Image: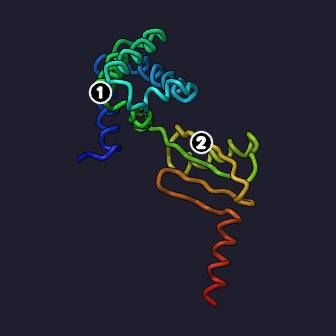
């Protein structure tokens, strides 16, 4: 049996390839981002997607109507209808995320995530982006920032699978573990 991630990756890859083939990648990306935003903001649509009571056919009709009203590309309308008819609507958010991730990878974009105890200034943000560019030899860096007051101070920077953790919280936890061993 295939895992949810494998299923989502297969659909995302299919959407990416169909978008390339039809030379409509930019339009599909825009439509996918609009749909993601709509799913995030609209609790009724979210309930429809997750409902086990509503039939696949009805889900397909509703999602197609919504996408047509948004003036989405015909490819995305058909694709989402197929997802609904195949009973995969509960994977839609993951499929969208996998598709957007595939786009980022193909464009050579690198995603970095920064978590700090307090919000950072634009100057520090720009400096970090420059440093990540140097480390990764990439000009396309997307830096997502988060605030987590439990860090106390310092920062946690994750670029791909590499993590740099210089938070006070981690240092205190490390010291605590060392003290238990004494």
State how the image is colored.
rainbow
Farthest-out residue, front = 53
The kind of secondary structure element at disc 1 is helix
Mark 1 residue crowding within 10 angstroms, few (<14) / some (14–19) / many (20+): few
Compared across the picture, whether 80 is left or right of 146 comes to left
Q: Is residue 93 above or below residue 124?
A: above
Residue indicated by mark 1: 17
- The image shows a total of numbered marks equal to 2
| Marks 1 and 2, how far apart at CA | 27 Å
Farthest-out residue, left = 1
Compared across the picture, whether 151 is left or right of 161 comes to right
| 23 vs 68, nearest the viewer | 68
Q: Estimate the x, y position of residue 137 in percent, counting from the top left.
A: 50, 46
Query: Cβ–Cβ below 8 Å for labels 1 and 2?
Result: no
Q: Residue at x 47, y 9 (%)?
A: 69
The kind of secondary structure element at disc 2 is strand
Dividing the picture into quadrants, the one containing residue 56 is top left
Q: Residue at x 38, y 32 (%)?
A: 52
Residue indicated by mark 2: 143
Tell me the quarter of the image containing the C terminus. bottom right
Q: Estimate the x, y position of residue 146 in percent, counting from the top left.
A: 65, 46
Q: Is residue 85 above or below residue 156?
A: above
In the picture, the disc for residue 49 is none
Compared across the picture, whether 152 is left or right of 179 comes to right
Q: Is residue 54 above or below residue 154?
A: above
Mark 2 residue crowding within 10 angstroms, few (<14) / some (14–19) / many (20+): some
Q: Estimate the x, y position of residue 127 in percent, counting from the top left.
A: 68, 46
Earlier residue among tags 1 and 2? 1
């Amino acid at each position: 049996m295939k895992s949810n991630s494998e299923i989502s990756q297969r659909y995302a890859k299919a959407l990416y390839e169909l978008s390339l083939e039809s030379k409509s990648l930019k339009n599909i990306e825009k439509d996918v981002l609009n749909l993601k935003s709509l799913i995030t903001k609209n609790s009724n649509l979210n309930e429809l997607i997750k409902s086990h009571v509503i039939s696949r056919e009805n889900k397909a009709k509703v999602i197609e109507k919504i996408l047509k009203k948004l003036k989405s590309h015909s490819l995305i309308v058909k694709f989402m209808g197929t997802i609904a008819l195949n009973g995969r609507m509960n994977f839609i958010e993951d499929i969208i995320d996998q598709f957007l991730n595939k786009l980022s990878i193909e464009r050579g974009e690198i995603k970095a995530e920064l978590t700090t105890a307090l919000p950072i200034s634009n100057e520090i943000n720009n400096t970090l982006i420059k440093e990540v560019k140097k480390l990764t030899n990439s000009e396309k860096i997307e830096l997502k920032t988060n605030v987590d007051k439990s860090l106390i101070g310092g920062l946690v920077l994750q670029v791909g699978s590499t993590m740099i953790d210089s938070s006070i919280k981690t240092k205190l936890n490390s010291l605590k573990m060392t003290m238990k061993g004494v």
